[in-house]
């Protein structure tokens, strides 16, 4: 019996009960489709993270108010009010590796222009944020240091805000209202698309941080400080210098926990990639479990098949099939079943990874490894779970089998 | 004198059912020469089925020797027995035992899948075998599209296709009406005239009457072993009234 004969025999017997074959394959199909689909989602997310490390800005080092331990529990980041504006000039003065820095104050706000309104994020910053966050102006100009000092009510807007509020109107020189306070639009930011966490980076308004503090949040602390190191190789020293300065300024004794956190761009990226990888591994493990469950279904059906076809096995043995032939026949059948299921599953998974970006906008990336891997795995599932039923078939006594009704 | 096709010598078969031991064969000695058409008869429980299973190499004797074409098959392994069944024995069953959802041609090709026959030769030999049983126009039909007699012809073609040393038929007419039975027996007689060795189990004396030798079993022993003046099936068919329906 050569492989071609085994294949033909397997297709013949699988074709006899198409509904059962289809239902049995379903477990494998779903398992393989999930593996291929989920890995493509994960790879897509990873690729997007990598793509946007650079887009995050130029050698960014971010300072956030730290999770200060208070009686054993962590207060959430941002709830701590430890960063103040005076930290920014101190960093610029004392950290040689830091090129520029900008305070960041954030506020969610309703903004109104004429009869349209839109809910967005208002970011208070210094003009340097353009360099640090790697943004450019499409039109108009950024506010200047004087306007920051005086707390001028001016702003630049992102692409999404432009579309939502102004439509075809040229917004420069127009006045929009943020929490009922009029702001003059002086510039439009170039579009930057989604962030690595899926946020729309164009859905924002940027105003001088002083104005945001005084008119919108009414606070005196900062949400974060963003800085740029002079070059990539200085990222780590910039982080260490900032830590030293802030520990001294915040009077933190050696050994005590900091009331702020400093993260470099690479650290942020690595953390995000790790999260993505972890999620992907988790989902793939679940998919593999589904595949194993599918394999048990295959074994179940193969056992039923062997019982039902006892007479056929008897006939074949009488005609000269050796135990090995019978073993190969049923093993081949199980393997063809799961490989076919695997192939359909791969096709479905590919379809999924093509459709998802259009449907929900998540990036996907197809690679060969999960497809080859899950195909081999499903074929392996067939061999593994088909072995026991096939062995049982091959050990039947021809006389008993022929007598079976 | 040529080697007998079958030479069994004092074979015994004991089934161990735990508490009781069943002595199905109690020392049977039989020789069958090439070209014989033997009918094996006996009541149920006489040991004829056990004897058939032994002849067909489906089972091994507990004691005694079985030489098939001079080769001792009583000590062979399962694999060796399977090869002997495949190459030297052609089985014909009462219930035809064709595989469903498979054309007549594919059914006839089946035994050759377990031997070293190329695909092309398999096809040629299967067609040839179907022609020899008069079914050349039915080769693409599936068993459920064929009458009982036609199904049994396909089974005979399947038994012939590997050119076995003997045909072993177990109640081949048991599921057929009397006219079709005689048609099948006519085919056996034709094969017999061509020199084929045929061993047929039957409990119908009428059917046994068409063979050239009758062996009667009783209580695990050969009770009677006689030459027989065979009736001519072809002649009997001509004397039957013609069929009115299909």
Image (cartoon, coloured by chain):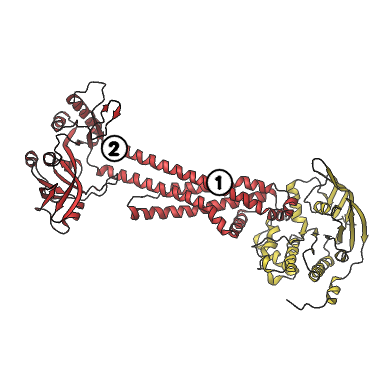
Taking the spot 31% from the left edge, 43% from the top edge, the residue there is: A50
User: With B242 as the anchor, is A99 left or right in this view?
Assistant: left
Shown colour of chain B: yellow
Residue B181 vs residue B119, the one in the foreground: B181
Residue A55 vs residue A220, the one in the foreground: A220
Q: Which x, y percent locates residue B35?
A: 85, 62
Give me the chain that's red. Answer: A
User: With A274 as the anchor, is A106 left or right in this view?
Assistant: left
* Tag 1 secondary structure: helix
Q: Which x, y percent locates residue A5?
A: 62, 56
* Tag 2 secondary structure: helix
Residue B34 vs residue A323, the one in the foreground: A323
Mark 1 or mark 2, earlier in chain: 2
Eyeballing the image, is B18 above or below B231? above
User: With A256 as the anchor, is A337 left or right in this view?
Assistant: right
Q: Is residue A329 visible?
A: no
Residue that carries the numbered disc 2 in the rendered image: A268
Label 2 near label 1: C-beta < 8 Å?
no
The quadrant holding residue B175 is: bottom right
Q: Residues within 10 Å of mark 1 (few under 14, many from 20)?
A: many
Determine the chain carrying the residue at label 1: A
Eyeballing the image, is B106 above or below A202? below
Eyeballing the image, is A93 above or below A328? above
Residue that carries the numbered disc 1 in the rendered image: A296
The quadrant holding residue B174 is: bottom right
């Amino acid at each position: 019996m050569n492989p071609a004969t085994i294949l033909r025999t397997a297709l013949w017997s699988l074709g006899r009960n198409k509904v059962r074959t289809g239902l049995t394959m379903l477990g494998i199909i779903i398992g393989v489709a999930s593996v291929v689909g989920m890995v493509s989602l994960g790879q897509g997310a990873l690729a997007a993270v990598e793509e946007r490390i650079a887009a995050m800005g130029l050698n960014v080092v971010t300072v956030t108010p730290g999770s200060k331990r208070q009686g054993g529990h962590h207060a959430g980041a941002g709830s701590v009010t430890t960063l103040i504006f005076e930290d920014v000039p101190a960093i610029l003065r004392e950290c040689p590796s830091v090129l520029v820095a900008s305070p960041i104050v954030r506020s969610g706000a309703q903004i109104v222009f004429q009869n349209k309104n839109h809910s967005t994020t208002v970011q208070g910053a210094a003009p340097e944020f353009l360099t640090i966050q790697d943004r450019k102006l499409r039109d108009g100009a950024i506010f200047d240091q004087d306007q920051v000092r005086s707390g001028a009510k001016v702003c630049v807007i992102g692409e999404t805000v432009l579309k939502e509020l102004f439509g075809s109107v040229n917004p420069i020189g127009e006045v929009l209202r943020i929490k009922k306070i009029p702001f003059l639009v002086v510039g439009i930011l170039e579009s930057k698309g989604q962030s690595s966490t899926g946020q729309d980076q164009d859905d924002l308004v940027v105003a001088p941080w002083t104005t945001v503090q005084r008119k919108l949040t009414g606070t005196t602390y900062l949400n974060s400080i963003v800085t740029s190191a002079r070059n990539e190789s200085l990222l780590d020293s910039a982080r260490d210098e900032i830590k030293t300065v802030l520990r001294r300024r915040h009077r933190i004794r050696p050994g005590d926990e900091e009331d702020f956190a400093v993260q470099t761009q690479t650290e942020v990226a690595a953390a995000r990639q790790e999260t993505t990888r972890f999620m992907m591994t988790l989902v793939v493990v679940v998919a593999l479990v589904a595949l194993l469950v599918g394999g048990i279904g295959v074994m179940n059906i193969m056992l039923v098949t062997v019982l039902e076809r006892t007479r056929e096995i008897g006939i074949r043995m009488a005609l000269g099939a050796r135990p090995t032939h019978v073993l190969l026949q049923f093993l081949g059948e199980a393997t063809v079943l799961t490989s076919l299921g695997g192939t359909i599953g791969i096709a479905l998974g590919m379809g999924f990874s093509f459709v998802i970006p259009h449907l929900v906008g998540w990036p996907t990336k197809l690679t060969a490894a999960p497809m080859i891997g899950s195909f081999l795995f499903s074929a392996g599932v067939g061999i593994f779970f088909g072995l026991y039923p096939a062995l049982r078939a091959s050990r039947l006594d021809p006389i008993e089998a022929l007598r079976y009704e | 004198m040529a080697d007998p096709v079958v030479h069994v010598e004092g074979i015994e078969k004991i089934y161990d059912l735990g508490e009781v031991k069943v002595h199905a064969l109690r020392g049977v000695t039989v020789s069958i020469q090439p070209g014989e058409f033997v009918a094996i008869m006996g009541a149920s429980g006489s040991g004829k089925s056990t004897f058939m299973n032994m002849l067909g190499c489906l089972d091994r004797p507990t004691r005694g020797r079985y030489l098939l074409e001079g080769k001792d098959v009583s000590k062979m392994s399962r694999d060796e027995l399977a090869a002997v069944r495949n190459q030297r024995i052609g089985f014909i069953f009462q219930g035809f035992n064709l595989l469903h959802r498979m054309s007549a041609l594919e059914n006839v090709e089946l035994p050759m899948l377990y031997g070293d026959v190329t695909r092309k030769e398999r096809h040629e030999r299967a067609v040839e075998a179907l022609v020899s049983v008069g079914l050349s126009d039915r080769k693409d039909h599936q068993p459920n599209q064929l009458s009982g007699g036609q199904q049994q012809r396909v089974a005979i073609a399947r038994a012939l296709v590997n050119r076995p040393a003997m045909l072993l038929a177990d109640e081949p007419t048991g599921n057929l009406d009397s006219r079709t039975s005689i048609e099948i027996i006519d085919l056996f007689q034709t094969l017999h005239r061509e020199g084929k060795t045929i061993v047929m189990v039957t409990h119908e004396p009428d059917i046994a009457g068409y063979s050239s030798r009758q062996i009667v079993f009783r209580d695990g022993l050969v009770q009677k072993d006689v030459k027989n003046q065979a009736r001519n099936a072809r002649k009997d068919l001509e004397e039957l009234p013609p069929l009115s329906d299909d």
